[in-house]
Amino acid sequence: MTVDLRVDLGGIALRNPVLTASGTFGYGTEFAPFLDLRRLGGIVSKSLTLEPRTGNLPHRIAETHGGMLNAIGLENVGVDAFLREKLPALHPDVVVVASVFGTEIEQYAEACKRLTASPRVAGLEVNASCPHVKSGGIEFGQNPKLLAELVRVVRRATDRPVLVKLSPNVTSIAEMARVCEAEGADGLSLINTLQALDVDVETRRPKLRNVLGGLSGPAILPVALRMVFQAARAVKLPICGIGGIASAEDAVKFLICGATAVQVGTANYLNPAAAGEIADGLADWAEARGISRIADLVGSIEVPGA
Ligand SMILES: Cc1cc2nc3c(=O)[nH]c(=O)nc-3n(C[C@H](O)[C@H](O)[C@H](O)COP(=O)(O)O)c2cc1C
């Protein structure tokens, strides 16, 4: 039996539901020696700004139990260099979602406009975990009004599918999901990293120069799964589930809880071929259980008494 792995993520046609997560897979080309990128549903670029950024000073990464902390500071080559150098270096059959961010709403909109000029950009992922300077540094994704304004403006700036990547550092993920749906987003990606801290007991210093960082990896999987489940119940938008996925079975959990597709992040650091293996493993998993269409798994969770 051949399993039909195709899914539609808010207008982005994917050959299978496994993508790589922003910031953990460079611009794709870095990983081409380890796996054929056409085996993946797609890749999400490092978050891009209008101008290049150098990011934070080291240490920017620290290992934790079951994951890692990072405070890279969103280093990236900028939208124009991405379009000029990074995108053309990828095989034309690789599905590319461009992640964007800015500290002002207008910057997001302009970045989306420029990226929309390239037919190679299959969709945009709006990273809402960025501090809004004018509001004193609160993340766009932490304030429903700011988030609504961001999605509204980005929606007007592009006709490409727009996925909004939500911050998990909120009280109600369902509320944020509803805001995005109301403003015309085509899909949601969740979750970004959880705000966290680790400290060296000898020096009594934070492990990261930035003090706070974002926690990712297997440690956050159950939190991410809970948020995908809650968002899927709150809105009709397709969801791309992210958080600690390291195996095909982890990916299946997200599909069952309501995700249409998934992204693999921290696992790429341990094994650069991880996402390809997870995509292949998903087909094997479904075939072994006589499931002919992977999309049939989406939202198939059985909640006792519901
Ligand atoms: C080193 C590193 C850099 C990241 N950079 C970005 C980024 O630029 N934009 C973004 O939206 N998310 C970024 N993320 C978050 C990931 O895309 C993902 O949402 C998160 O790590 C959870 O998935 P995981 O547990 O599979 O890593 C980054 C994560 C890591 C570990």
Image (cartoon, rainbow, N blue to C red):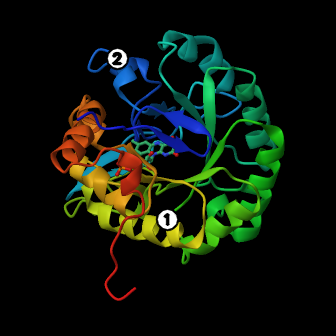
Neighbours of disc 1 within 10 Å: few (<14), some (14-19), many (20+): many
Estimate the x, y position of residue 285 in percent, counting from the top left.
20, 46
Pointer 1 residue: 168
In front here: 271 or 278?
278
On the image, the x and y values in percent for residue 246 come to: 24, 47
Percent from the top left, x then y, of residue 97? 56, 33
One can see residue 169 in this view: no
Residue situated in front as seen by the camera: 56 or 194:
194
Q: Earlier in the sequence, mark 1 or mark 2?
A: 2
Of all residues, the one furthest to the bottom in this rendering is: 305
The quadrant in which the C terminus is found is bottom left
Give percent across and percent down for residue 277.
23, 33
- Which of the two discs, 1 and 2, sits closer to the camera? 2
Tell me the crowding category of disc 2: few under 14, some 14 to 19, or many 20 or more residues within 10 angstroms, Cα based: some
Q: Quadrant of the N terminus?
A: top left
Quarter of the view holding residue 128: bottom right
Q: Which residue is mark 2?
A: 32
- For residue 42, above or below residue 199: above
SS category of the residue bearing label 2: loop
Please tell me whether residue 46 is drawn above or below residue 184 in the rendered image.
Answer: above
Is 116 placed above or below 256 here? above
SS at circle 1: loop
Mark 1 and mark 2: Cα distance apart in space: 31 Å
Say if 101 sits above or below 185 in the image.
above
Q: Amino acid at mark 2?
A: Ala
